């Protein structure tokens, strides 16, 4: 049976978000309904609201969530009612060329629920189909997803902490560990220490990097980065970050540089701050209009690898439980990312705080 629940939508471009009544269908074949317990506010949600992703309004926002499976549809074997899950936005197909090559994190046929959640009776747009953010839509009491989007993890982890793995923290951690392949003894620089960059710092520390240099333009962010394992900090408003990183690495540059801002100037810094044959990992998401120019001779002359990292090149079924284990063992401070917990009605003010750089993460608790 379908049910009516409260959720947060962006009705039209740049309009403030609203809490409204939403119809959630009973799960069909391959689908699951998840009772959401917590969902972090990510920059991408704001992007949706601003019309920066596409114009398929109204959007059901939220995509960094954990909760409990309430019901599953026909043929679902991945999860069952009662399972504690983190929602992922890469339910891989298992059949495309990337999947067949054994690189499912590049899957280009990921899937979502086929049925749509809709606006309830009484709404001016009653019946309108919602576009869930990243195919999830989790600022809502219960959401409908593809069963493959549910990754089962240990129920003892708090939902607030677990949900963070669903997007930003996984992206940053994976950028360092999966894409950058940071290993023991490496020097690592992370440019931009918001939630994504700090997760890269934490990943580098857990992977055994010895020198971890946090770079940001905001001293508050540099202080926080130390808590996640940064051994050195550079305020790039006050110092040339390339020179500073070279000075801290014996004049060489870092083995791995993670760019977690998504701007041409910081990408260039990352490019020149790496050691010969070092790796640059771009995880900051650029807007489509941005371009960067680099002398081809410098690309040739430095060797190494220029990589981008999408969702931290993660495999949710492998990486989410691993990170939850590290968290429960006290080795990964997921709670350190949570600046505040808020209610469904506070998403708009969370966007404002995010914009001002005041929070690492606001997390909606439902
Ligand atoms: N140099 C260094 N740091 C910078 C610069 C700069 N020129 N400009 C901004 N920053 C810092 C900010 O001070 C902030 O600490 O980058 C950080 C960005 O953090 P958030 O805004 O919290 O964003 P976050 O969630 O970490 O995401 C970072 O990754 O997933 C993408 O879309 C996301 O592009 C974004 C990036
Ligand atoms: Zn695939
Ligand atoms: Zn996100």
Image (cartoon, rainbow, N blue to C red):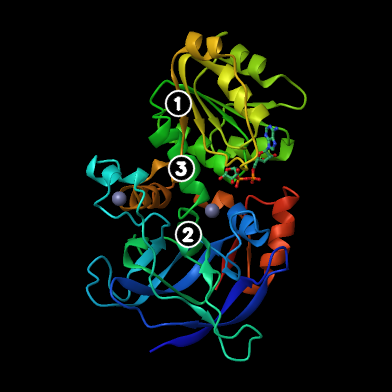
Q: Name the mark nearer the viewer: 2 or 3.
A: 3
Location of residue 347 (image quadrant): bottom right
Q: Earlier in the sequence, mark 2 or mark 1?
A: 2
Residue linked to disc 1: 209
Q: Earlier in the sequence, mark 2 or mark 3?
A: 2
Q: Name the mark nearer the viewer: 2 or 1.
A: 2
Residue linked to disc 2: 163
Q: Quadrant of the C terminus?
A: bottom right
Q: Is residue 236 above or below residue 287?
A: above
Q: Residue at x 60, y 19 (%)?
A: 294
Percent x, y for residue 102?
Answer: 24, 41
Residue linked to disc 3: 310
> Between 284 and 158, which is closer to the camera in this rendering?
284
> Between 81 and 306, which is closer to the camera in this rendering?
306
Label 3, secondary structure: give it.
loop
Whether residue 30 can be seen here: yes
For marks 3 and 1, give the CA distance.
Answer: 22 Å
């Amino acid at each position: 049976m379908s049910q009516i629940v409260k959720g947060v939508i962006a009705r039209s471009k740049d309009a403030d978000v609203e809490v409204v009544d939403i119809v959630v269908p009973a799960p069909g074949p391959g689908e699951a309904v998840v009772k959401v317990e917590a969902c972090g506010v990510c920059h991408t949600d704001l992007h949706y609201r601003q019309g920066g992703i596409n114009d398929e309004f109204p959007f059901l926002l939220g995509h960094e969530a954990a909760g409990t499976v309430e019901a599953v549809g026909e043929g679902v074997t991945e999860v069952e009612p009662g399972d504690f899950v983190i929602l992922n936005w890469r339910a891989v197909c298992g059949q495309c060329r990337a999947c067949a090559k054994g690189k499912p994190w590049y899957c280009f046929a990921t899937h979502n629920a086929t049925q749509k959640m809709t606006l309830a009776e009484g709404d001016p747009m009653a019946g309108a189909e919602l576009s869930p953010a990243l195919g999830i839509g989790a600022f809502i009491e219960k959401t409908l997803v593809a069963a493959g989007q549910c990754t089962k993890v240990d129920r003892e982890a708090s939902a607030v902490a677990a949900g963070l793995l669903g997007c930003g923290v996984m992206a940053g951690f994976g950028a360092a560990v999966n894409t950058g392949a940071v290993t023991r003894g490496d020097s690592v620089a992370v440019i931009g220490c918001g939630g994504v960059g700090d997760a890269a710092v934490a990943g580098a520390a857990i992977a055994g990097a010895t020198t971890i240099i946090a770079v940001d333009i905001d001293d508050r962010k540099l202080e926080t980065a130390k808590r996640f394992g940064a051994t050195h900090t550079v305020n790039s408003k006050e110092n040339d970050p390339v020179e500073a990183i070279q000075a801290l690495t014996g004049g060489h540059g870092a083995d791995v540089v993670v760019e977690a801002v998504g701007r041409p100037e910081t990408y260039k810094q990352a490019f020149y701050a790496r050691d010969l044959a070092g790796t640059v990992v771009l995880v900051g998401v650029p807007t489509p209009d941005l371009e960067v120019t680099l002398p081809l001779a410098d690309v040739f002359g430095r060797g190494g690898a220029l990589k981008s990292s999408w969702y931290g090149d993660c495999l949710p079924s492998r990486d989410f439980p691993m990170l939850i284990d590290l968290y429960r063992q006290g080795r990964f401070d997921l709670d350190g990312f949570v600046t505040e917990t808020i209610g469904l009605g506070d998403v708009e003010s969370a966007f404002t705080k995010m914009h001002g750089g005041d929070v690492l993460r606001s997390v909606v608790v439902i």
